Image: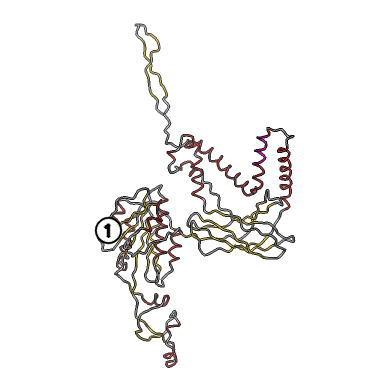
Amino acid sequence: MPINTIPTPTRASAGGRAEVRPRCVRILPVPDSNTLSPPALRRVLYHFYRSGHAVNFFLRRRVRGRGMALLVMGVILGCLTGGRFYQAPVQLFGFGFILGLISLACLPFRRAKMRIVRHLPDHATAGEKVRITYEVTNLIRRPLHHIHLIETPPNPCPGLQQFAHAREPGGEKRNAFDRIFAYHCWLWLCELRTRFEARESEELLNLRRGQTTTLTTTLLPRKRGLIELSDLRVLLPDALGLYQRCKRTPAPSGTLVVLPARYPLPPFELPGAARFQAGGDAAARQSGPSGEFVSLRDYQPGDPIRLIHWKSWARTGKPVVKELEDTFYPRHGLILDTFPVAGNEALFEAAVSVAASMVSSIDTHECLIELMFISGREHVVTAGRGTGRAETLLEVLASVEASEQPQFESLGRLVLRHAEDLAGCLAVFAGWSDERAEFLAKLESSGVRAAALVLCEGEAPPPRPGVHFLRRDRLAADLMHLPPHL
């Protein structure tokens, strides 16, 4: 904090002249409207918001809609009548209050002991609802009735350090009160950390001892990746439906693979479709060759039964198969940019969705796709023509993470090592910069046919040859306007 020295006269000297002594004046800094609130205040706010979130979660899981309506009506009636207890509305509220107490008193007697087996689908997609099935078996003597199941997501509250140093996008436009108390920043962080939304399962009406039934519920995954389902709760409402017990059940945990969100694409051709790659035995055995008959050869493990030449086997006494000519097909490279600018993680997620849309739209029965990116180390994953399924690439994209430092030189060397086998490359960039332009130019100068899909914020930059800009807020519309030849 700056300290300015200001000369001030204090007393007169013997010669009649005023003696000047320096006086230190502390000048307080003017608070900047764009600065974050002090760390001490953020610490207090963090514990306050975290406690409020815990109380809110506790009440929402234990007070049903009717109970909440009863509480709200009681407050309204109390305000309208001014506390005059002889009026009929207040007496009506008192009757409802007694019913609420009776419901609360009955909750401890609502018990359940069940064996639950969770059945998950192979995959889910971010932003699309997925159905989960449970096998429920009653393990107590009394029949179970009017119960629900619900999955509980992990606690979305951020850590203290993350909240203390977080900057909400667009937060500088908020007023001083919102910037200091940072409640919108807290909500934004909780929204980012929420993995999925869960709803109550269908109601279990009556289940006798030892009986097994099936319940279903829906989940809405918010983000791609792996979702660990390890906190299943059983909800036991009271007879009036005002309150409910929320009890954790010891069901085995499960993992749900959430694939990236995908968008429909128009018909298109990838760059460099004229170069082809020979099929070979691996592709022939798994996807089946379609060429002309060439000769007969001895059977090898893995050959399909439909290629066995039965007459020759009967004549020679050993299995013989037909050998067909090799088929030829293109091999394309799909390059994913995992080097987003700090604070632009939304562009990276959009780039992953675009790459997943490309994988889903390309016919992997007629070509090979090599997904190349750097995330901690070099990754090359191949799918198509018997070497792997397209779902394999989607599963890889579901778990890919951004790199902290840009490594375009390493990515370029990775692509050039496979350039001899590639018909062309399609790069998906999370933003546009001189480094990315230089990366494309280096591929073109090495003889690799390359095109790029570039994610951007706001208005798209001027068009460039072989570069197609996609606005993140209008991604679906811009993808549908891609040219037929990339």
Name the foreground residue: 292 vs 7.
292
Q: What residue lies at 50% left-to-right and 54% top-to-bottom?
A: 222
Q: Is 278 situated left or right of 302 in this image? A: left
Q: In this view, does 387 lie above or below 102?
A: below
Residue 204's spot in the image, x, y percent? Answer: 66, 59
Q: Is residue 36 above or below residue 474?
A: above
The image's colouring method is: secondary structure
In this rendering, is residue 54 above or below 276? above
Work out which residue is located at the far left of the displayed protein and give it: 445
Dominant SS type (magenta): helix
Work out whether 351 lies above or below 93. below
Task: Please state, as top left, top right, bottom left or bottom right, where the C terminus lies in the image.
Answer: bottom left
Q: Where is residue 466 in the image (x, y as percent from the top left)?
A: 29, 58
The number of discs equals 1
Residue at x 49% of width, y 39% of height: 182
The residue nearer to you, when weighing 253 against 486, is 486
Q: Which amino acid does label 1 sit on?
A: Lys
Residue 129 placement (x, y as % from top left): 53, 58
Task: Work out which residue is located at the far bottom of the displayed protein and give it.
Answer: 315
Question: What residue would you read off at disc 1?
Answer: 442
Q: Residue furthest top?
A: 15
Within the magenta stretch, is there residue 74? Answer: yes
The stretch drawn in magenta includes residue 454: no
Quick one: label 1, few (<14), some, or many (20+) residues within 10 Å?
Answer: some
Which range is magenta?
A: 72-80
Q: Where is residue 419 in the image (x, y as percent from the top left)?
A: 30, 65
* Quarter of the image that includes the N terminus: top left
Secondary structure under tag 1 reads: helix
